[in-house]
Amino acid sequence: MSDQINTAHWITWFITSLPWIIGGVFFVAAFTRYIIFYTVQRHEWFSVEFEKRVNRFVESQNPGDVNDVSFYVLSKKWLEKTYYEIFELRDRMQRRRSDKVMRLADRVFLIKQGCAWLVKDILKQLKFLKWTQDTPKMLNITKTTFNHNPCFNRIFGIFPINVVNDLISILPGLFVVGGVLGTFLGIRGGLTALGSMNMENLDATKRVMDSFLAEIAHAMGASIVGITFSLAMHIVNTLFNPERVFGSMIDRFESALDLLWYRSDNNRFPSNSVAFDEHKDPSEALAEEAIKLETSKTPVEA
């Protein structure tokens, strides 16, 4: 008898607590989904900036321009230029306002480190491409580089995005199952009480039936809560869809690399190539590049 009382107590507690449990899980999952979406957007931010600069460069070129252009040299130049320019511009904007949210985001989401890792890894792979008339599989190179980025593939640099995102994706179904489970448990408890009815005592029977109907109505609330939060989770997953952003990011980056490949004539690796230095001050790096550009235009007199 005591076991039945304990079981009924736990069932009642579960049904009562279920809406709060589902609601708490929903808000944690919605926040986490947004964090994942934001993290992947930082990938896309760099891809968009890189694509814009490559497009402007290609549009400025003519078919009769000087040949013997190395794909690796072009890629290195525009990847570094994109990296230095976006962070130099951002730092300049930060000096004009007291808000340091972006720098806080750098520390929390490892944005700058992630972009630096991306530039280094993509250059490492492009360096060994064999020059052919056919365009290499830039899609595979791009996907591999982005997928292996340790800064952008973990939330706060700790939790793996793929695992957490997969768990969040199945939550709408789990909410419905949890609500239905709460409903069936409530019905089960009510059916147990029906077995004690005495049909000869109409008043007692009416009280049991009223109690049974009240428990059923209360248990149905669990299903309503589960379905409601399931629909809300579907909306959140659709609005903050990292897979959509990831696909756009890959397409942009691949398209930019393809354009640089079409403009190139070889993939020679210069012996005097200077390694990319992500710790270099962006303003200093851009100033050096501007000086080199001007000196290359000015003939040196003997």
Image: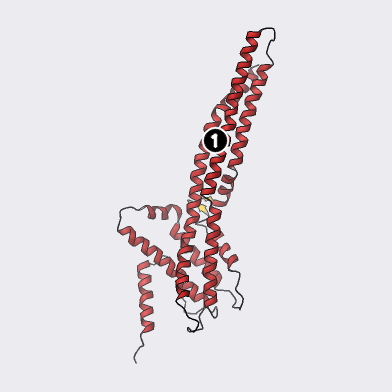
In the image, residue 224 lies at what x, y percent? Answer: 57, 32
The answer to whether residue 62 is left or right of residue 130 is: left
Compared with 54, 200 (above or below) is above
Compared with 106, 124 (above or below) is below
Q: Amino acid at mark 1?
A: Ile
Locate the C terminus and report the quarter of the image it occupies: bottom left
Q: Residue at x 53, y 38 (%)?
A: 25
In the image, residue 203 lies at what x, y percent? Answer: 63, 8
Which element type, helix, strand or loop, lies under badge 1? helix
Q: Residue at x 63, y 32 (%)?
A: 180
| Number of residue marks | 1
Compared with 107, 231 (above or below) is above
Q: How is the image coloured?
A: secondary structure
Mark 1 Cα-neighbour bin, 10 Å: few <14, some 14–19, many ≥20: many
Compared with 257, 298 (above or below) is below
Q: Residue at x 33, y 62 (%)?
A: 92
The answer to whether residue 221 is left or right of residue 64 is: right
Dot 1 corresponds to which residue?
A: 22
Give 62 or 24, whichever is nearer the viewer.
62
The answer to whether residue 200 is left or right of residue 32 is: right
In the image, residue 251 lies at what x, y percent? Answer: 55, 63
Locate the N terminus and report the quarter of the image it occupies: top right
The quadrant holding residue 194 is top right
